[in-house]
Image (cartoon, coloured by chain):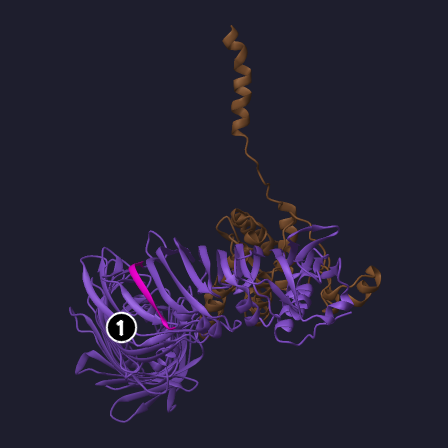
Chain colours: A purple, B brown
Amino acid sequence: MPGRILTLLLLALVACPGQARTATAGIARIQAVGVELRDVKVQLRWPAGAEQGELHIAAARIEAGVAGYRFRNVDWRCPVSRRPQGAWHCEGPLRADGAPPMRLALDLSAVTTDALLSSGEARASLHRNAAAPDSTELELTRVPIAWAQALLAQAWEAGRITGGRASGPVVVEMPAGRPLHAEARLAIDALSLESTDGAIAIGDLDARLHVDFRQPTGAGALVAVDGSLRGGELLYGNTYVALGGAPVRLGLDAMQRVGGGWDVPRLAWDDGDVLSIEGAGALAGDGSVQAFDVTARSRDAVQLPERYLSGWLGLAGLAGLGLDGAFELAARIDGGALSAVDATVNALTITDPRQRFRIDRLAGTLRHATGAAVDSELRWQGGALYELAFGPVRLPMRSEAGTLRLREAAELSMLGGQVRLDGFSLRPPDADGGLRIGFGLELDALDIGALAQALGWPAFRGTLSGRIPSARYADERLDFDGGLSMQVFDGRVDVDALSMERPFGVAPTLSADLALHDLDLLGFTEVFDFGSITGRLHGRVGGLRLVDWTATAFDAGFHTQPRPGVRQRISQRAVQDISSVGDASFVTSLQGRLIGLFDDFGYRRIGIACRLENEVCRMSGLHSAGAGFTIVEGAGVPKLQVVGFNRDVDWPTLLERLAAVASGDVAPVVD
Amino acid sequence: MRRLVGMPILFALALCACVTINVYFPAAEAREAAREFVEKVIGDEAQPSQPAPEAAPPGDGGMALLQRLRFDPLVLLGIGSAHAQSQPDISIRTPAIQAIQSRMESRFNSTLRPHFDSGALGFGGDGTIVVRDASKLAIKDRVAVNAAVADDNRDRKAVYREIAVANGHPEWESQIRDVFAKQWIASARSGWWYQQGGAWKQK
């Protein structure tokens, strides 16, 4: 209709070519094809005999209700000229409050209207034909997508377009009494947008999209998007997707609900072998997922952590996690929470970059549901926990009432022995609390030599066995009931009150009480390269606390106990080494300088204790001896007595020197 | 009457039976420890107040030998006697806590500080870091910063716990967390944001 008014004005003026004319029209309201103009002033001046006149159109307000556009104080001036066959052409600057300066060119004929809007490199041309009055054709060339901000706000109020340009044809149909229909085939370059809270964002995304948009009156919009995405990045909550160079095919159908939010009957995402997703569900008004059924497949998971999982892995402290293999996963989200998972895994190797764990060739199924019982079974071919390798395992599981349990005990080989896991149950984090795990553990003849080698300890030999009837993990704390027993040095070390805090987290902590029973001291001293002592050793390490696998506190005491048939001898080297640990002096019948004359000595008792606290080891021995404490009480001739004097010893220095003694870096010094 | 005479004694006995020994939380020492820790992490502008009392430097062996005029093999090995540490103040000098502290310090300088300056991050009221306004971060940074915040909050949790445990009172964990929460806010630089009573405020 505005075109027709303009044509009438032009015709009226040009009908009287003899003299200069000015025609002015003031129109309170013009309404046409979904656009409303208010307080419109049209002025046309045509000097006498001139080839062209001047057109000035000003509108106080222009509103395109359906598309959500509102402009104020729109002003367009242009020289107007005649073209053949009764057509008119006018091109000039267009201004509106808050909009960048633009140029508008208009060609009017009896049948067609053509407009070309340009601003910088952006051009949008519009074509209308009187023969098809309901249809408007647009052709976009590098148009800022921010021009569609108002359109986006209709669908998603919190969305802000911050960059990107679009090119391609758009056809808008507005038949009277039928829904608005727009169809676009767009090439999008460097799209950026984000929600006001920053939780949803797109950055630097290139895309080729076919968009179909319908807006029935009185109902929500229907959108169908099909096309491909390339490059750029997407963020949705904690999910961060870094698209590579290869195009990702995207398909999406969405229907806006009248009360807000969207139904999504079709979502398809195809990133080749890395990840393909099919799903359907519903989103809330703020963009959060209310319900979704989704199937995800990865035929080659190597790139999956980097391209799709980095956001979640970073949060979980697993940044850089390596995946290799394939899997398929079906999941259902109900009421915003995960309600069912059905995963099929095929030879998936999982590697922690910080070497805390590794699982080789995980395969089988994992099913978990909050409702009825479902069975599944996982297997792996091997793996490692910290430096400790373990063998293959079969884990038959049942999920019932939100808890995942082992249907039967699982056995795996580790350190040359067997580990048996029974009564395993796992409850994922939910409204009632965080992750909870419970299990029973039985260790049978684990090789301590292999353990020592893996952990870089001195070359202990022996076996580790024991049963922990129940262990519980909750709130980052692992508690063990029952105890373990190590058969070492022909004796036994019992481990009790075992617990761990943050087993896989920051500064893992291990607490335990150890009791040493009847260890062969000769084997013990040989392992530590600590001279040689024959006899039997007893003792305890109470309140042991390792933080980051380093001892920070304990109350330890060791002493010998005579056993029939066992000689109690101590070598010269061992005397030196004990002295260095206990800060001791030789007293009584043997002078320091005489010690070098003998290879070994008989002893009656040896006892040394250390209470570690605040990096200080408070030492004591068998009993007090004047200002010091007796560590070695000799027997026979020559009679030896070793007495310590420094009761408080700096622990890190002590450790360093112990290591030096053990590695033979420090030669014993005899004065 | 005779029975009544016995009552006060019974009453006193009952009172005695109820007596429990309280170990009071050393709030002032905890504040000082928290201040030292937090200033070290946040770094440069403010100076840590006093150099900490140090355990024995390992190199004092020779002198000790002369002074004591006594054979001391430990001294030959270079082990000096450690200074006994007085008991109930709050110690933050265990290797585990110091390792976490230096990791937090480098993370703060490499990743977190500019986002406190920009207002993207703020200190929560519970001694953690909170992403206050993600839109101030580039999309890729958002992921890295979220991960750094999660890592830092895990470290913080471990620090509060380990300080309590290292000082022999695991039950002090929540009090130590509260002291630290106040200290992070107190040490925050001008312009940084913090949470108080659920609302954001700018320092």
Q: Is residue B188 left or right of residue A174?
A: right
Quadrant where the image shows the N terminus of chain A: bottom left
For the residue pair A582 and B62, the one nearer the viewer reads as A582
Q: Quadrant of residue A249?
A: bottom left
- Which residue type carries mark 1? Arg
User: Which residue occupies 17% across, 71% down?
Assistant: A176
Locate residue A668, reporting x and y percent.
70, 72
Q: Which residues are magenta?
A: A416-427
Report helix, strand or loop for mark 1: strand
For the residue pair A469 and A343, the one nearer the viewer reads as A469
Locate residue A520, reporting x and y percent.
52, 64
Magenta stretch prevailing secondary structure: strand
Q: Is residue A223 visible?
A: no
For the residue pair A288 and B59, the one nearer the viewer reads as B59
Q: Is residue A286 left or right of residue B157?
A: left
Which residue does the numbered mark 1 point to in the structure image?
A: A379
Query: Does the magenta portion include B126?
Result: no
Farthest residue toward the left?
A177
Query: Does the magenta portion include A422?
Result: yes
Label 1 chain ID: A
For the residue pair A50 and A529, the one nearer the viewer reads as A529
